[in-house]
């Protein structure tokens, strides 16, 4: 059963919890620490997308797997991509069901993107600035990866969800890292997209907490659920609704909904 809060009390709960988790100390325990390592825009983008792609399961295991993946790429993910270092990968497991051939598939797609655009931001910002621009950007990103791998088996495409129906949690996570710009945890690297355009990354903590708070009524964990929840969060903060990713994650992790 949902916990009943007044609108004012719920906003206070979300704001206070977001403030607690959206803190510099959060970085060292979160996969975002990997894109934080870099200064060059393209290095940060590549690190963000690849790290977010394996961001499922236990966080300690994600961090270990991400460290392994970054070790394979060396000091510059961009140089690794453009030098096609991924074509020399030995067959190995990277993270759970994500293997070196999956990594090579995504890297091949990123290579093609960087041959056409100076950055992944340029790919997303090339689209009209309507309410579906983020979803269309994910679709274009996914299509670009697919086209770059025409000679390959496309089983690896499963690691980039189809935005026609899917919640696209991992893509929305990478976009949160790259676009949100409050200067605390998220990188704020991209300026052509606004934090107001973002959608919530729908992970398990976020889902359970949102339903407990009555913010998400839809029972399927799909694109419509993402849109429903994001619409609710925009009621509390229209310019930066995904700030509340920290709050919903934090409340779900701590399982403390009676804080307000």
Image (cartoon, rainbow, N blue to C red):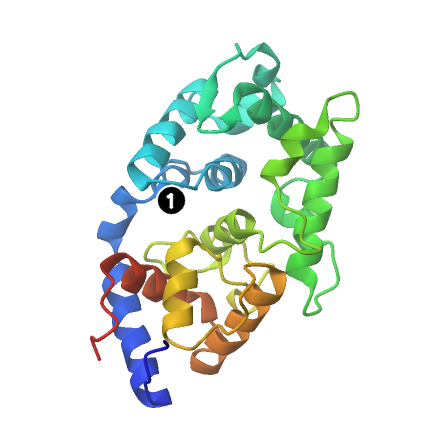
- In the image, residue 220 sits, relative to residue 47, either above or below, namely below
Residue 101: image location, x then y, percent: 59, 20
Which quadrant is home to the N terminus? bottom left
Q: Is residue 175 above or below residue 224?
A: above
The count of marks equals: 1
Looking at the figure, which quarter contains the C terminus? bottom left
In screen coordinates, is 260 left or right of 201? left
Q: Position of residue 200 (x, y in %)?
A: 49, 62
Mark 1: secondary structure? helix
Identity of the residue drawn at 22% across and 67% down: 256
Residue 12 lies in what quarter of the image? bottom left
Residue hosting label 1: 32
Whether residue 168 appears in this view of the structure is yes
Image coords of residue 198 (percent x, y)? 55, 63
Q: Which is more toward the observer, 83 or 228?
A: 228
Density class for disc 1 (Cα within 10 Å; few <14, some 14-19, many ≥20) is many
């Amino acid at each position: 059963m949902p916990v009943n809060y007044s609108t004012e009390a719920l906003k206070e709960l979300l704001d206070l919890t977001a403030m607690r988790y959206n803190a510099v100390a959060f970085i060292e325990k979160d996969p975002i620490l990997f894109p934080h390592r870099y200064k060059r825009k393209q290095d940060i983008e590549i690190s963000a997308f690849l790290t977010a792609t394996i961001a499922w399961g236990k966080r300690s295991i994600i961090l270990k797997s991400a460290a392994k993946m970054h070790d394979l790429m060396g000091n510059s993910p961009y140089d690794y991509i453009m030098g096609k270092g991924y074509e020399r990968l030995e067959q190995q497991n990277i993270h759970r069901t994500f293997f070196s051939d999956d990594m090579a598939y995504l890297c091949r797609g990123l290579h093609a993107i960087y041959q056409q655009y100076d950055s992944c931001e340029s790919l997303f910002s090339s689209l009209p600035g309507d309410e579906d621009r983020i979803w269309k950007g994910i679709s274009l990103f996914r299509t670009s990866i697919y086209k770059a791998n025409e000679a390959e088996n496309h089983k690896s495409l499963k690691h980039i969800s189809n935005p026609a129906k899917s919640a696209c949690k991992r893509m929305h996570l990478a976009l949160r890292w790259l676009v949100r710009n409050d200067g605390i945890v998220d990188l704020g690297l991209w300026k052509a997209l606004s934090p107001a355009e973002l959608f919530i990354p729908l992970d398990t903590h976020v889902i359970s907490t949102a339903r407990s708070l009555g913010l998400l009524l839809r029972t399927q964990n799909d694109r419509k659920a993402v849109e429903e929840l994001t619409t609710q969060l925009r009621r509390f903060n229209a310019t930066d609704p995904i700030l509340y990713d920290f709050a919903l994650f934090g409340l779900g992790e701590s399982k403390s909904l009676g804080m307000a």
